[in-house]
Image (spheres, grey):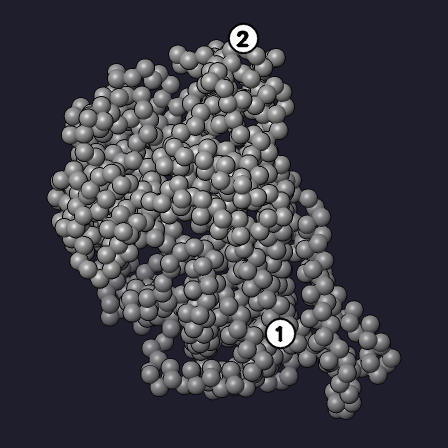
């Protein structure tokens, strides 16, 4: 081992000295001690002056480095077609990598701006309905105060409402914005940047309010808002005590204002003793070095002592998982956004590899044109490592040019990319970290792309080249084919995945929703509208644009309330079912177009308050025979089942419809659902409706939502994935096509004499096309054999995340295979036709 590290000049003397010393030590000491002394002497000889120089890259002068880059520049100008393909492919690959990198960085840094990021948790419960586990983030109001009182390991606890929309008024200006009501040391637990105010006391007054900077500007313009008053929901005045910088886009908590709970308010005081209203979020920070699992048990024990809840297990959900691991399946964390982060990271790596493979293949394909250069340099004394360094320098130089082009591309593409992914991504070129990452990316890409060409080209034997015996063998042709196959596999996989995602979205969109969302509008129902509802209804019906309208306490596109199933005759006590709840009036089914499978709808009579409608999913889950007319019991109330509804998709269209129980009722809150007549132009109808609404509710702005658009938002994630993969698959295919065009051009050029001879001997164009194309056709077929099972496995696993999904059919792969094969034949065919049209005499005159 010492011989490996020591300079050759020292080795002979050192080895002799070591041998003599070991014999001497062996005569004086035991074998073990002699060996220890021998190892000590070996280590003692490992001194800097005696060690070999292991530098892989020689210490070139600035002049030599300049020379290498000058040679690289001349080669680029000399081989323009090669340069365009390589730089174009690499710049596209790097552009995709940067864009995806910005998106991934934004996702993985969610909430990291909080100082206590690693110490913040949300209290969450797994509620077990006989092995049907529902993960619930809603907690009771008094939990946060009791946690800090009874569990000393809890350092801070905060409780908040959900983010709700409320009306803010300053003089005559009224706007609706989303905000939070909070209790506890909110601004100590979470870190927000203040423009004005002190985090320690901004919420000390129960009638104080903290605004974001953009909301403050909307309400007060350029005037300093500190100390001014805002009226909330035409009811309570709040004084502005703080202004926050606008929240980062990668924040799990979203709000535009914060108000404190007024603990002196009788209603709030009442809630402090209510242990069965699960409507609040609870966040905690623990003391350092505590056993989190023991605290989770303590919270469960605390809830068990104060409630009748015997089915829930409470646990602490860390902030670092709120965004990336936000999904639970039967009580087990099943991932979430992290799936998309991994997916797009893989896509970026694949596209960058495809671009690098282009460089490798084209560089080795041009090896015959660089062979003489290598031979001359070696003859003049250049060492292999010097040639390796030169080719690596050339690769990094080309990558640097491609990176500069990519920066310009990202600058112009980023606004459109932000619109597509609904983010505010930026590339701050003034940040030194960006340039460190850029340098790493350039070196990584340059070394990766140039590794095989550099090692291959530098290994040429100058004698064979100078004698004209140079020939490319299997050592370059086989790896090149493998790399081309990888490109085809990646392109086939990306395009196939795009088609499968598209088919899945189309399949679910065509699913029967159970009602007609077209020409259906939802409008928030407040006290003024509800008080004048009948007059408003008559006014709208008289316009000739409205067919019908109904009130619901929650939107038809979401479930706001879930609870354990009611009791019914013949119920199996071992069966645990989670029911969704909805309150609606007598026009509910008629307005929405929901089919009544059995029984009747609400009549509007007072007796309907003790009646319910069940959907078909509920009847099947309950195994409830002859349900219509029978009594069910929920809590202390008894209801009569008067009708069975067709299943209505209210939440995820990718999942099965959940059991639903519809109660009769109407009141402020919730929504007014308005069905427009067919053939009515919505914009004209909305103008008439706005007039009527302003008549009965002049204090609030006319706010509406089209149900079909709201329902369409349920496909946002999947459509975003499809759109991004579409674009990146097209880029991958384009890069692959560039490389294929370059490869075909060089291969045909090397075989021009053969093509010319065959043409003279009478070969037709079809014969020449087959001769050149058969190798590429073979590579496409091999790629299909690899790509199909891999893509089938990956996409099937992705589809299994959805309860309602397609099966991956083989037809997709045949279509994609045909597309790839067709494009390959087009690219190769055009190059072959161009070669075949050349006068053969030009290539065989010397024979």
Picture coordinates of residue 651, whole percent (x, y): 50, 35
Picture coordinates of residue 253, whole percent (x, y): 31, 44
| Residue 18 visible in image | yes
Farthest right residue? Answer: 762
| Residue 119 visible in image | no
Mark 1–mark 2 Cα distance, whole angstroms, equals 75 Å
Residue at 13%, 40% (x, y): give it. 204
Picture coordinates of residue 313, whole percent (x, y): 34, 23
Q: Tell me if residue 12 comes above or below residue 336 in the rendering.
A: below
Check if mark 1's residue and mark 2's residue have beta carbons within 8 Å. no
Labelled disc at residue 742 = 1
Q: Tell me if residue 646 comes above or below residue 309 in the rendering.
A: below
Farthest top residue? Answer: 570
Residue at 61%, 19% (x, y): give it. 599
Which residue is identified by label 2? 570
- Element type at mark 2: loop
């Amino acid at each position: 081992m010492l011989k490996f590290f020591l300079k050759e000049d020292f080795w002979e003397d050192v080895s002799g000295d070591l041998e003599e010393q070991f014999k001497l030590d062996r005569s004086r000491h035991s074998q073990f001690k002699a060996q220890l002394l021998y190892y000590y002497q070996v280590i003692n000889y490992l001194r800097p002056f005696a060690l070999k120089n292991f530098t892989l890259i020689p210490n070139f002068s600035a002049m030599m480095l300049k020379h290498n880059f000058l040679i690289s520049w001349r080669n680029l100008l000399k081989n323009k077609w090669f340069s365009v393909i390589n730089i174009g492919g690499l710049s596209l690959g790097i552009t995709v990598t940067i864009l995806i990198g910005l998106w991934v960085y934004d996702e993985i840094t969610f909430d990291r701006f909080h100082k206590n990021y690693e110490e913040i948790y949300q209290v969450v419960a797994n509620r077990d309905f006989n092995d049907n586990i529902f993960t619930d983030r809603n907690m009771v109001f008094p939990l946060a105060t009791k946690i800090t009182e009874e569990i000393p390991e809890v350092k801070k606890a905060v409780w908040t409402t959900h983010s709700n929309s409320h009306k803010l008024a300053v003089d005559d200006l009224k706007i609706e914005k989303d905000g939070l009501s909070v209790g506890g040391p909110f601004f100590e637990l979470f870190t927000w940047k203040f423009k004005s105010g002190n985090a320690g006391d901004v919420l000390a007054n129960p009638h104080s309010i903290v605004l974001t900077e953009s909301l403050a500007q909307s309400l007060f313009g350029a005037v300093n808002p500190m100390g001014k008053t805002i009226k909330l929901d035409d009811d309570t005045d709040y004084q502005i005590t703080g202004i926050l910088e606008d929240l980062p886009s990668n924040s799990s908590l979203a709000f535009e204002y914060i108000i404190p709970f007024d603990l002196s308010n009788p209603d709030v005081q009442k809630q402090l003793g209510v242990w069965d209203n699960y409507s609040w979020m609870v966040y905690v920070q623990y003391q350092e070095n505590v056993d989190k699992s023991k605290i989770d048990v303590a919270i469960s024990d605390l809830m068990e002592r104060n409630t009748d809840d015997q089915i829930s297990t409470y646990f602490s959900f860390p902030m670092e998982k709120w965004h990336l691991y936000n999904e639970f399946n039967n009580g087990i964390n099943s991932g979430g956004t992290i799936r998309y982060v991994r997916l797009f990271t893989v896509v970026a790596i694949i596209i960058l590899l495809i671009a690098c493979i282009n460089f490798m293949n084209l560089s080795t394909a041009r090896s015959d044109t660089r062979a003489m250069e290598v031979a001359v340099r070696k003859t003049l004394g250049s060492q292999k490592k010097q040639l390796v360094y030169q080719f690596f320098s050339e690769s990094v130089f080309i990558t640097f040019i491609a990176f500069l082009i990519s920066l310009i591309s990202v600058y112009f593409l980023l606004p459109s990319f932000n619109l597509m992914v609904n983010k505010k991504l930026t590339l701050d070129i003034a940040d030194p970290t960006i340039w460190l990452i850029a340098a790493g990316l350039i070196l990584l890409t340059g070394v990766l792309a140039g590794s095989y060409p550099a090692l291959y080209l530098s290994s040429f034997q100058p004698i064979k080249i100078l004698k004209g015996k140079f020939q490319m063998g299997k050592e370059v042709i086989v790896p090149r084919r493998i790399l081309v196959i990888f490109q085809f596999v990646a392109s086939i996989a990306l395009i196939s995945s795009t088609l499968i995602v598209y088919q899945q979205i189309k399949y679910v969109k065509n699913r029967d929703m159970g009602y007609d969302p077209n020409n259906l509008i939802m409008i928030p129902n407040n006290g003024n509208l509800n008080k004048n509802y009948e007059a408003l209804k008559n006014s709208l019906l008289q316009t000739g644009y409205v067919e019908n309208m109904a009130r619901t306490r929650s939107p038809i596109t979401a479930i706001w309330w879930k609870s354990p199933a009611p009791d019914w005759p013949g119920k199996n006590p071992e069966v645990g079912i989670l029911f969704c709840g909805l309150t609606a009036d007598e026009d509910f089914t008629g307005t929405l177009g929901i089919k009544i499978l059995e029984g009747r709808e609400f009549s509007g009579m007072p007796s309907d308050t003790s009646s319910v409608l069940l959907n078909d999913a509920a009847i099947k889950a309950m195994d409830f025979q002859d349900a219509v007319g029978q009594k069910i019991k929920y809590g202390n109330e008894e209801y009569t089942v008067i009708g069975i509804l067709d299943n209505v998709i209210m939440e995820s269209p990718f999942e099965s419809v959940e059991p639903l129980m519809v109660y009769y009722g109407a009141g402020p809150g919730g929504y007014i659902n308005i069905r427009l007549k067919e053939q009515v132009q919505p914009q004209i109808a909305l103008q008439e409706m706005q007039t009527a609404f302003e008549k009965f509710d002049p204090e609030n702005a006319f706010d509406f939502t089209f149900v079909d658009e709201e329902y369409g938002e349920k496909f946002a994630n999947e459509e975003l994935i499809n759109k991004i993969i579409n674009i990146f698959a097209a880029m991958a295919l384009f890069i692959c096509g560039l490389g294929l065009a370059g490869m075909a051009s060089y291969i045909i050029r090397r075989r021009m004499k053969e093509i010319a001879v065959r043409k003279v001997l009478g070969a037709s164009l079809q014969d020449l096309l087959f001769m050149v194309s058969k190798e590429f056709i073979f590579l496409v077929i091999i790629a299909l054999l690899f790509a199909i099972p891999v893509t089938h496995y990956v996409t099937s696993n992705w589809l299994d995340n959805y309860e309602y999904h397609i099966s991956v059919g083989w037809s997709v792969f045949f279509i994609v295979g045909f597309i790839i094969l067709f494009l390959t034949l087009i690219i190769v065919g055009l190059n072959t036709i161009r070669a075949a049209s050349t006068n053969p005499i030009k290539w065989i005159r010397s024979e």
